[in-house]
Amino acid sequence: MHDTHEIVVNGVPVRVRVDPEPERADRLSLWPSVGEYPIYDPFLYTTMTTDEERNKRFRTALAHLAPGKRVLDLGTGQDVVWAREAVAAGARQVVAVEVIPDSFRQAAANLTAYRLEDQVTLVRGESTAVDFAPKADICVAEIVGSLASAEGAAVVLGDAKRRHLVPGGVVVPHRAVTQAAPVCLADLFAKQPVAFSAAALTYLQAIFDWSGKPFDVRLRIENASPDALLSESTTVEELDFNGDMRARQRTTTRMTITREGRIDGVLTWLQLWCLPDDAPLDALRMKTNWASIYFPLFQAPVPVTPGAELELTFVVTIGDDGVHPDYQLSGTLRTTDGREHVGTLTSAHHGGPFRAQPIYQHLFPVT
Ligand SMILES: C[S@@+](CC[C@H](N)C(=O)[O-])C[C@H]1O[C@@H](n2cnc3c(N)ncnc32)[C@H](O)[C@@H]1O
């Protein structure tokens, strides 16, 4: 049914359950969420630069906003993709910043290859630690996660608006939200083992090496079907990049179960607007580089019938690096027979517990 592989983190072996089948479009793939860690490589960059569902929205926004303007491409990545689009759109000046040293070096080589080194100024470093003059009119930054805020967009773009943009400057994207709805993981994976894709092992290793120890990574599920949801979805966090942006948020919502099934957690996913009047990108319903994130809440699946209610509190705080959020979820499931089931989860960006929930004990077996 599944294989067990061993990776070694800081000299300590960690066993990982792996799906023996290769990734396919008609199967789910389970990965750790990767975007919030400095482990980008050519494969991850390519999944983004070939994501047309995403790229057409950013391209349209830049074509509309960039002509004649000073543009800052924050987190340009190895492919300097928005810097190139800004030049193509007729920007007056383009500055691109990248924090990962290897990505910066590759970005510099790509600018030379595209003969854009005179039109784009490339800066190495973290945007929160560098200064730019003159200030930009437009800041384009694709630092949005499968959980909207996971890559630190609220803190980083809050800083960019204060220090790098002229008053009235515009951020692209315009808005991002995280949606949530109850699901049962075992039912989502009814036709295949609950196990990481073999291709994800490299990234688990990179995240654990970066962190110095294993921890309960966020579970990224590709190709999840909206049919798995047991209620309408609800918004659990909102980032209005051109409005009142809150890095810390607390949202409590109630979802009424609409069909018979089982619940052990919630599925969350991104909706993204690059311009205010866009039709949003919906990462659950469209094929993009973003996927959904599953959060376990209950120790075992709880059977439900229509009319049951899940009250979910979703809290976003900022972790100890001052940029990346930690999430706390608490759920109270009231079934129609009058019983109450309570579950909680803390999902730290790094350094949280390891094997704290049954799903993580399953994915990282001890023997
Ligand atoms: C999701 S990737 C996007 C890459 C590229 N802009 C694209 O859209 O295809 C985010 C990139 O932003 C970089 N990054 C994130 N936060 C940053 C910051 N505060 N300053 C500079 N670079 C940052 C990361 O290292 C990574 O290369």
Image (cartoon, rainbow, N blue to C red):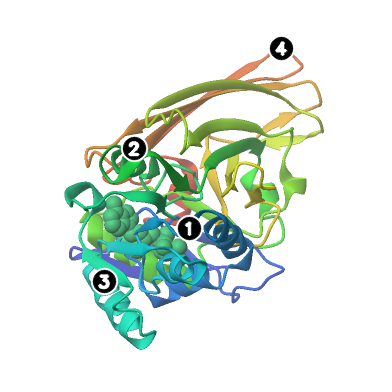
Disc 2 or 3, which lies upstream in sequence? 3
Q: Is residue 353 visible?
A: no
Q: CA distance from mark 2 to mark 1?
A: 20 Å
Q: Are marks 2 and 1 in contact (CB under 8 Å)?
A: no
Crowding at dot 4, Cα within 10 Å, few <14 / some 14-19 / many 20+, comes out as few
Q: Nearer the viewer, residue 133 or 238?
A: 133
Q: Which residue is mark 1?
A: 66
Q: Amino acid at mark 2?
A: Gly
User: Up-down: is 298 above or below 227?
Assistant: above
The residue that disc 2 covers is 158
Q: Residue at x 22, y 54 (%)?
A: 126
Which mark is nearer the camera, 3 or 1?
1
Q: Earlier in the sequence, mark 4 or mark 3?
A: 3
Ligand 1 within 8 Å, label 4 CB: no
Looking at the rendered image, the quarter that the C terminus falls into is bottom left
Q: Residue at x 24, y 52 (%)?
A: 134
Secondary-structure class at tag 1 = loop
Residue at image mark 3: 104
Mark drawn on residue 338: 4
Q: Is residue 112 visible?
A: yes
Q: Is residue 124 above or below residue 50?
A: above
Query: What's the residue type where badge 3 is placed?
Result: Phe
Disc 4 from disc 3: Cα separation: 57 Å
Q: Is mark 3 within 8 Å of ligand 1?
A: no
- Disc sitting over residue 46 in the figure: none
Tell me which label, 3 or 1, sits earlier in the chain: 1
Q: Which class describes the residues within 10 Å of circle 2: few (<14), some (14-19), or many (20+)?
A: some
Q: Secondary structure at mark 2?
A: helix
Q: Residue at x 36, y 43 (%)?
A: 157
Q: Amino acid at mark 4?
A: Gly
